[in-house]
Image (spheres, helix red, strand yellow):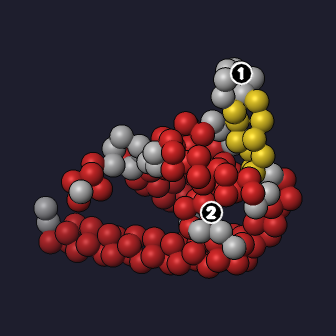
């Protein structure tokens, strides 16, 4: 690896870590403001990103056990953040949906962040935006459930 490539790689990793730290802290603040814990907030985030899901799907996405996910879903339902309904594909299971009112309230909290992100992204042309999107898509695929070997090695 060339010296320049190594320097850019290290800088990119550092900036990514900084970005992630800021995102985690922001999400912690939002969770605190909503009176829920960060894991519960991320389950809402996943429901917002991927739409209604079964508890098993959510457990798979988060890496939580099915029992752990049941506890999260119970808390979110008690707080009226989600709604449970019958799964039309399997009457033995349920589908969890992000409730409309809290979803709107949370979207409003994100407006300032999205406005800042729009300003940042405005500096890039379409080709550059495609590269940035590709980076995040590849990064997300590398961290999908089943690919999380790093945390299992820590146990």
Question: Residue 89 in the image: x percent, y percent?
Answer: 69, 20
Q: Is residue 69 left or right of residue 139?
A: right
Question: Residue 132 in the image: x percent, y percent?
Answer: 48, 58
Q: Is residue 48 above or below residue 90?
A: below
Q: Is residue 33 above or below residue 43?
A: below
The mark that comes first in sequence, 2 or 1, is: 2
Q: Residue at x 46, y 49 (%)?
A: 64
Residue that carries the numbered disc 2 in the rendered image: 41
Q: Residue at x 21, y 54 (%)?
A: 153
Q: Quadrant of the N terminus?
A: bottom left
Is residue 112 visible in this depiction of the protein?
Answer: yes
Q: Is residue 4 left or right of residue 104?
A: left
- Would you identify the image quadrant in which residue 72 lies? bottom right
Work out how far the residue at label 2 is from the one at label 1, CA to CA, in angstroms.
Answer: 27 Å
Mark 2 crowd level (few <14, some 14–19, many ≥20, 10 Å Cα): many
Residue that carries the numbered disc 1 in the rendered image: 91
SS label for mark 1 = loop
Q: Quadrant of the C terminus?
A: bottom left
Question: Residue 126 in the image: x percent, y percent?
Answer: 58, 56
Q: Residue at x 55, y 36 (%)?
A: 56
Q: Nearer the viewer, residue 35 or 48?
A: 35
Question: Residue 78 in the image: x percent, y percent?
Answer: 75, 57
Is residue 113 visible in this depiction of the protein?
Answer: no
């Amino acid at each position: 690896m060339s010296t320049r490539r190594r320097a850019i790689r290290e800088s990119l990793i550092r900036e990514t870590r900084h970005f992630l730290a800021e995102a985690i802290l922001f999400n912690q603040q939002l969770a605190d403001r909503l009176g829920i814990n960060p894991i519960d907030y991320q389950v809402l985030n996943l429901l917002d990103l991927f739409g209604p899901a079964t508890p098993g799907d959510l457990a798979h996405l988060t890496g939580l056990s099915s029992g752990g996910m049941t506890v999260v879903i119970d808390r979110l339902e008690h707080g009226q953040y989600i709604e449970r309904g019958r799964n039309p594909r399997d009457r033995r299971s349920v589908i969890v949906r992000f409730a409309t009112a809290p979803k709107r309230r949370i979207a409003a909290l994100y407006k300032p962040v999205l406005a800042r992100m729009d300003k940042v992204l405005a500096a890039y042309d379409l080709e550059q935006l495609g590269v940035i999107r590709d980076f995040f898509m590849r990064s997300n695929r590398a961290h999908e459930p089943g690919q999380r070997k790093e945390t299992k090695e820590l146990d």
